[in-house]
Structure formats: C-alpha cells, structure tokens
Image: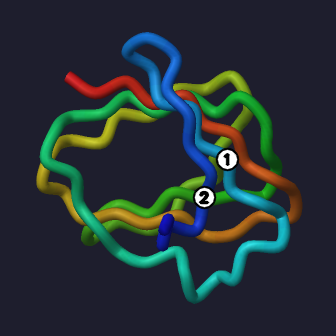
Amino acid sequence: MNNFPFKQTKSGSVLLREFSADVNPTELVWHHDKRDRKVAVTTGSGWMLQMENKLPIMMKEGMTYFIPKNTYHRLLKGNSSLVLEIKEF
C-alpha cells in the first residue's frame, strides 16, 4: 500500500508525481533523498519548497529546482493540485 501523500508514475527516467489539492499538510514531512534531483513544476499554484536551514520559496510553473542528495527539504501546501516531473541523477 502507498503511504505517501502523492500519486506517482514513471515515464522513462522521469518520475511524475501528483499531490492533491486536498492533501493533509501534516503529511508533507521533512525528508531527504539518496540521489540529486531536478524537480520541474508542471502545474500548481501557491506551493512552496523549503530546503534545510532556508526560508521557503514559492514554486512556479515551468521552473526547475535542484535538490542535492541528502539535503533535508519539504513542500508546503498550496491552493491547487501540484504536478512535478522529477529526474534523479
């Protein structure tokens, strides 16, 4: 069973991840990944990305954000669904 606050599919080497507009904000927890990631925002408004020891930044459609491996980060809920394209390397 999927215990994550998102739905995910894979298209080639790209992960497509969708967070519902109804996601419970308490499910958006601090975490880190084992690989570097480039995260592109396909759709979504009002969502923010907060990196370890940094203030949150507004995520914008069409923008790509780099998350270094082993860096704690989290999403802060916006006012719509959020769709991300994630490339790991």
User: Residue drawn at (71%, 28%), measured in percent from left and top?
Assistant: 42
Per the image, label 2 sits on a secondary structure element best described as loop
Please count the marks in the image.
2
Residue, far top: 12
Choose the circle earlier in sequence order: 2 or 1: 2
Quadrant of the rendered image containing residue 53? bottom left
Marks 2 and 1, how far apart in space? 5 Å
Mark 1 residue crowding within 10 angstroms, few (<14) / some (14–19) / many (20+): some
Q: Nearer the viewer, residue 55 or 45?
A: 45
**Which numbered dot is residue 8?**
none
Left or right of 50? Residue 89 is: left
The type of residue carrying mark 2 is Phe
Residue 55 on image: x %, y % = 44, 68
Residue 24 picture location, percent across and down: 69, 83
Specify the label residue 6 is tagged with: 2
Q: Secondary structure at mark 1?
A: strand
Which amino acid lies under the numbered mark 1 shown in the image of this protein?
Glu
20 relative position to 34: left or right: right
Residue 23 lies, with reference to residue 6, above or below; the image says below
Q: Quadrant of residue 6?
A: bottom right
The quadrant in which residue 84 appears is top right
Give the residue displayed 44% in from the left and 11% down from the top. Answer: 12
Q: How is the image coloured?
A: rainbow
* Number of residues whose C-alpha sits closer than 10 Å to that of mark 2, classed few (under 14), some (14–19) or many (20 or more): some
Circles 2 and 1: CB distance less than 8 Å? Answer: yes
Who's the residue at 45% across and 20% down the image? 14
Q: Position of residue 5 (x, y in %)?
A: 58, 68
Most foreground residue, 34 or 58: 34
Residue, disc 1 = 18
Q: Which residue extends farthest bottom?
A: 26
Name the residue nearer the viewer: 7 or 1.
1
